[in-house]
Image (cartoon, rainbow, N blue to C red):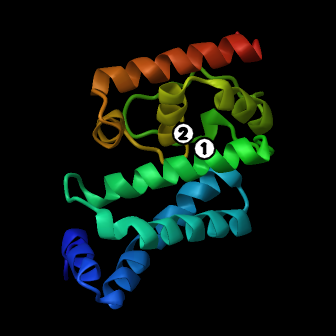
Amino acid sequence: MQNDHELIRKYQKGIPTAFDEIVRRHLSNTIGFFFNITRDQMASEDLAQDVFFKLYKHLKNFRFESAFTTYLYRININTANSWLTRNKWKNYLHLDQTPDRGERDSSLENEWTKKELWDAVAKLPNKQRIVVMMRIAQELPYKEISEITGMSVGSAKVNYHHAVNTLRDWLSYD
């Protein structure tokens, strides 16, 4: 079985079936990422389609400086940011319902509604918003977040901590 980089090289050489295999490998995770944000299967599939369309157009420029999944996460995050801004965070999500791999922050309140929370998340500074989205929607540990974003693990933790404190203040659930 070929790894992602081998498939990308084939695609860059003009073999379209290599892109089909990339889509087969990563489609369900991409849809799952968006479903965790939208809670709407149709919207999730549409957003995943947008991601793979962007990928189809820009994968020829992939420079092999990082793992393909890192590149894909960045596209997912940018697409999610655009969708969330465009849709004014209509959907609901409870932070406390998201399983965590490792350090658990269980101090967030159960009564936060998805709309209130995502409205507030949309107002966070970019780095904080990205870390919160990756922790919540993708359930990524800080180590992976640091690899994807290029920030240190400590910086990812600090951004998440500041974001949670800011969200608590804004939502007045202390």
**Which type of secondary structure does the marked residue at label 2 adopt?**
helix
Q: Is residue 16 left or right of residue 4?
A: right
4 up-or-down from 142: above or below = below
Q: Foreground mark, 1 or 2?
A: 1
Is the C-beta separation of discs 1 and 2 under 8 Å?
yes
Q: In terms of depth relative to the viewer, which is nearer, 61 or 158?
A: 61
- Mark 1 and mark 2: Cα distance apart in space: 9 Å
Number of on-image labels: 2
- Quadrant hosting residue 17: bottom left
The disc label shown at residue 81, or none = 1
Q: In terms of depth relative to the viewer, which is nearer, 161 or 70?
A: 70
133 up-or-down from 30: above or below = above
Q: Is residue 143 left or right of residue 65?
A: right
Amino acid type assigned to the residue bearing label 1 in the image: Asn
- Write the residue at 49% across / 70% down: 52
- Write the residue at 42% across / 80% down: 24
- Quadrant hosting residue 23: bottom left
- Write the residue at 44% across / 73% down: 56
Q: Position of residue 60 (x, y in %)?
A: 32, 70
Q: Which residue is mark 2?
A: 133
128 up-or-down from 63: above or below = above
- Going from N to C along the chain, the mark reached first, 1 or 2, is 1
Amino acid type assigned to the residue bearing label 2 in the image: Met
Q: Is residue 49 left or right of residue 101?
A: right
Quadrant where the C terminus sits is top right
Quadrant where the N terminus sits is bottom left
- Write the residue at 63% across / 23% down: 108
Q: Position of residue 117 (x, y in %)?
A: 72, 30
Disc 1 residue crowd, few under 14, some 14–19, many 20+, Cα 10 Å: some
Q: Position of residue 153 (x, y in %)?
A: 29, 27
